[in-house]
Each structure stands twice: as structure tokens, then as C-alpha cells.
Amino acid sequence: DIQMTQSPSSLSASVGDRVTITCRASQRIDNYLAWFQQKPGKAPKSLIFAASSLHSGVPSNFSGSGYGTDFTLTINSLQPDDFATYYCQQSHSYPFSFGPGTKVDV
Amino acid sequence: EVQLVESGGALVQPGGSLRLSCAGSGFTFSSYAMSWVRQAPGKGLEWVSVISGGGYSPQYADSVKGRFTISRDNSKNTLYLQMNSLRAEDTAVYYCGRMHYMDVWGKGTTVTVSS
């Protein structure tokens, strides 16, 4: 099974900061990597699929990169609405798996 | 508007059964694979199961294999998750999502397994 790790597990940031979250797969997953944002008590929201493709309606200050085993979610100029927990997920091999999450707070 | 609405969550005793439903609208339901993901209280997301658009090739997490069954009725635009032999560790909010990479999520339905 493919294990997903994320770093850091949490970080403190301010509005306007540039934030980078890393996701690593235990095996190569090509670009079968998605990113999600979740706020407390709410369903997750899809941000990025295929490692770097933004879903429609996702603000352009979000971007994703990476291929193989190492991936990055970058939030340029953090906005008040961006404080949340972020998860990565691989859909390359069954069973699919999520990273443990990265909490971005003030 | 593309929408997914889960239902069927409840309080159930250990060893019991439950069937969750997920109704899709605003898209051609049969054209898309559909997934279930769960989140235990205070924990992260856990992938549970996926099924193809035609209802073939279901896949499961090891933690639910042999106890849960995913299915769909494309004539009703509805996805199901039959959960048997429920355990306390199955307590979670269950979300359905479109595609393998969950481009659309429902709001979730809560399953509590407790005596």
C-alpha cells in the first residue's frame, strides 16, 4: 500500500504570507495527486487534481507542483479564508490514501 | 448545479448494519466513478471505497473489506454503501464524492457505532 506523508503537520502564518506544504508518497504515483481544503465542521473542498490542475473556481493564489513521489501545494499571499487544514490524496494505486493533513492557522 | 447528498447515517449498535445513500444531481451520474471517504471524530480523512460508472470493479480499504459493499443504481442516480458487522472504529462522518479524485463532495452523513 502507498503511504502518504505531509509536512509540516501544522504551521502558523499571517495574511499575505506565502505558504508551502509538502506531500510525499512512499512509491511513485506519477501525477495522481489531489489536494483538498477543509474547514472545521465542513466537508472538504477540492483544490487541485493531477498534481497541478486547479479546479474551476479555485483562487489563482493556489498552485500545485510535483511528479513521482514529491509534491507541493503553495498558497501565495495567504488570505483570511485560507486558514484551514489541507490534505493530499493519491489515486494511483488501490487502496487510495490520504496524507495526515496540515493545519494552517494564525 | 452539480450536487451530492448523503443520507442514512444513524446510531447503531456494534455488530449491526446500515446502508448509506448518496443522491447525485446536475450531472450524468452513470458517466462517473463514485467514492466514499470517512472522517472519524477529530481525525483525518480515510478513503473507504470506489466504484466505476457502470458499477463494476469495486475497490475497498483493508479496514472495511469483507464488511462493506459499495453499489450504485444509475437509474436512480444513487450510490450506496452497505455496512455490516459495524465496529466502534467505524464511527465517522461518511462523505461521497465524484470521481477517484473527489472533485465534488457531499456534506456528509454521521454514523455512530455504540451500545
Image (cartoon, rainbow, N blue to C red):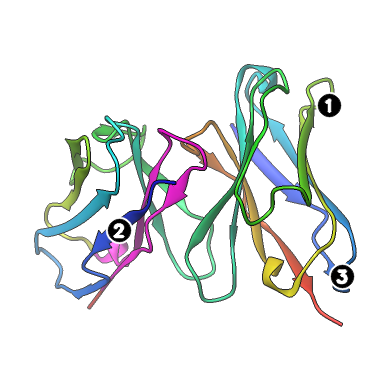
| Circle nearer the viewer, 2 or 1 | 2
Q: Mark 3 points at which residue?
A: B12
Q: Give the range drawn in magenta.
A: A80-104
Q: Is residue B31 left or right of residue B103?
A: right
Q: How crowded is mark 1: few (under 14 residues within 10 Å), some or many (20 or more)?
A: few
* Mark 2 vs mark 1, CA separation in Å: 38 Å
Q: How crowded is mark 3: few (under 14 residues within 10 Å), some or many (20 or more)?
A: some
Q: How crowded is mark 2: few (under 14 residues within 10 Å), some or many (20 or more)?
A: many
Q: Which residue is painted at 17% across and 60% down in the image?
A: A78
Provide the chain ID for the residue under circle 1. Answer: B
Q: Is residue A96 magenta?
A: yes
Q: Which residue is painted at 83% across and 55% down in the image?
A: B8
Provide the chain ID for the residue under circle 2. Answer: A
Q: Name the residue under label 2.
A: A5
The amino acid type, in three-letter code, at marker 2 is Thr
Provide the chain ID for the residue under circle 3. Answer: B
Q: Is residue A20 left or right of residue A44?
A: left
For residue B112, which quarter of the picture? Answer: bottom right
* Mark 1 vs mark 3, CA separation in Å: 26 Å
| Circle nearer the viewer, 3 or 2 | 2
